[in-house]
Amino acid sequence: MFDVAQTLGQLTVEEKAALCSGADFWHTVPIPRLGVDSIMVADGPHGLRVQPDANDHSSMNSSLPATCFPTAAALGSSWDPGLIASVGAALGEEALAQGISVVLGPGVNIKRSPLCGRNFEYYSEDPVLAGELATAFVQSVQSQGVGTSLKHFAANNQETDRMRVSADVDERTLREIYFPAFERCVRQAQPWTVMCAYNRLNGTYASENYWLLTQVLRQEWGFAGLVVSDWGAVWDRVAALSAGLDLEMPPDLHRSPAALVAAVESGRLAETVLDQAVSRVLELVARSPHTGSQPVIQDFDVEAHHLLARRAAAESAVLLKNTAATLPLALSPGATVAIIGEFARTPRYQGAGSSKVQPTRLENFLEEFSARVGAQVQVRFAPGFALDSDALADGLAEEAIAAADGAEVVIVLLGLPASAESEGFDRSHLELPASQVALLRRLRGAGAPVVVLLANGGVVDIASWRDDADAILECWLGGQAGASGAAQVILGEVNPAGRLAETIPLRLADSPAYLNFPGEEGHVRYGEGVFVGYRHYDARLIEVAYPFGFGLSYTTFSYDDLAVRLSGSDSAGDLTVPVSCRVTNTGTRGGSEVVQLYVGQLDPAVVRPPRELKAFRKVALEPGESTVVEFALSSRDFAYWSVAAAGWVAPPDSYQVAVGSSSRDLHCSATVQWPGPGSGGRPLDDQATLQEWLADPRGRDALVAVVGMDAGGHPRGIVGNAELIRVVGNFPLRKLAVFPWTGLTHEVVDAICADRAGKKVP
């Protein structure tokens, strides 16, 4: 293995420039004379897409067989970092077997709008959940000696005009919503690479954004790895490299290397800056387990990984409705079950685009369900509808109704066809194809209980047809073993434990980005600010179909003994809020509950969501079993991003700490007084208002000392006049010195500000 520093010193400028662009679509550039080989990367958020044919990069169907795990939309609904870690470890093993050094995932972009065509590749609308799951994924993949690529940094939340659109986002919103998942993963897991987004951020391409790639990612968060472009995201190679983008993929071999050489020779680009990027490329190659000259082999445990994919699918399914305990099915010998829907034999199990996987094996629900119930249960099947048609064909409908006639239960598989959602375009509505909904309503008339299984990457409208179903199981895009996973759940072999990682609205018009998505004339304004997902619905008291965190079980749980206290001190820097509660399985089946912890400031001076997820824990309990779940909140969990202070501010105030099973089902809550003073805040200077001075205990003491006390022991002037404070308390201190009745003069303001220089207010 070569020495990075020594090798760097032996490279020519031309070789350095070449190393900062790929050799081809999937490989880095080798330098044979110095022992630097190439390495291979591959798509792989939910399964590898390794293309052995170096001349066929455009085809999405030419990859080697690999395990197709459930997509991130499904895995996010598991709320289970341990499960994600198991999937990550398996992907790492397959990467080792297939000669891959870096898996291009995970995607942690926030689900800003339910219409985003790539939502199937992202975990959640919440940054804490997305960040925790991504961290587990990155750590487990990299534990196998294979790198990851955390993507797409940043504000890549739509497919419309994705290569050019400017995402116009204020800094507070970036810091609170769109950055934290990246930040958590970088700080805790150090992915080998971070992939920049296609889009512009506030007018500057992400690939050329120095503030984004260098100041925030490297200097603030301590990222030590390599920044790679999304495929085709580089416009100006010199500007991108100067901003902190190390590796361009795929290479623009006719322009980029020559542009870097010319920039160095002209002095427009310092060679030391080029050297930094080259060092990161060399470090990535040096730590990689493979080189491009190694043969591609397959020797991972195909069957074990298929079983893991089945477990992941089953544990990610979300039970949305279960009237009169329709599920799990209790089928007697001789029973008849009708299975309706083309998806039963033609499964929709993954998204379309760059993440498309060639599965090692593919199940369908008709076969898997029939095998599980055995010959003693009669299974009838009818396709019911054509996958790519909105019109309900009379012949197909009549066949489905005939199959349902006399059945004890009707299982209907509905969902979005592949043509409805994909990388590359956004959806225009949330509805299922009209033919499917029309068929469901006709089947309802058969008289038997109706169970709906959904296959979709992004949320769909459910409210308009849910009364026509007795039970609804959201299966998402469940991967190659999604069929057997769904069968296990509805037959009771697995107790559903999935919880929604995104809100399902009643109407598209209720969604937070409705008026600002996908933008116009090259710009998309993030006008909803920090009110994304449940933060929006909860703040505006908007009724939803199903709230964030929701999911039913075949058992029940109770919460009690919530304990919230302060520990440590602000002065010592160890102030925390330990939280604990007891959770008990009060039902008759073993099952898992996702305990969700939310925090909300009760009287905020800035507009904040009423509650925000700060931690969660998934616990498995047998009937009658209890466990105490513990959390520890830090100042960051009480803070918002203050643009004025350029930092996180945790104001002293009362906060509600609540635990529950969704953002709208909070079983226990308590109030804690966060003492502050909080980090950051604007300086206590002459531009700070009287109210800001009085809100800070030390600022108030300084004012009282200056104005003095009257005979009754009350502060003199405006400081002691509550009525005047209400009227002019929002005046800066300097302006109050103009009015003689305030008790403040310019000299007094100068003195007090000099004394308090550098003091911060919350």
Image: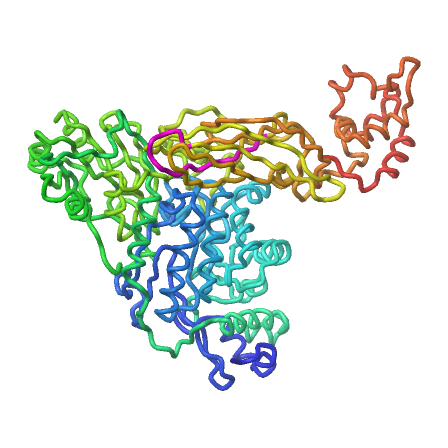
Can residue 602 be seen here? The reply is yes
Residue 180: where, in percent of width, then height?
Answer: 54, 46
Nearest to the observer: residue 589 or residue 162: 589
Residue 282 versus residue 128: which sits nearer the camera?
128
Task: State the residue lying farthest toward the bottom.
Answer: 33
Residue 449 % position (x, y): 19, 28
| Residue at the far top in the pictured view | 712
Q: Position of residue 38 (x, y in %)?
A: 44, 76
What's the colour scheme? rainbow
Residue drawn 91% across and 16% down? 710
Observer-nearest of 196 and 312? 312
Give above or below for 54 relative to 160. Answer: below
| Left or right: where 275 falls relative to 436 | right
**Which residue reaches farthest front?**
624
How many numbered callouts? 0
Magenta stretch prevailing secondary structure: strand
Q: Identify the residue at image location x=92%, y=32%.
A: 747
Estimate the x, y position of residue 718 in percent, counting from the top left.
83, 20
Give me the residue at 16% from left, 32% from top: 409
The reply to whether the magenta stretch includes residue 595 is yes
**Left or right of 272: which side holds 468?**
left
Q: Which residues are magenta?
A: 585-600
Rendered position, 444 above or below 187? above
| Quadrant assignment for the C terminus | top right
Q: Quadrant of residue 46?
A: bottom left
Q: Is residue 497 left or right of residue 757?
A: left
Residue 432, compared with residue 192, is above or below; it is above
Check residue 410 for magenta coloring.
no
The part of the image, by quadrant, that contains residue 500 is top left
Res 528 seen here: no
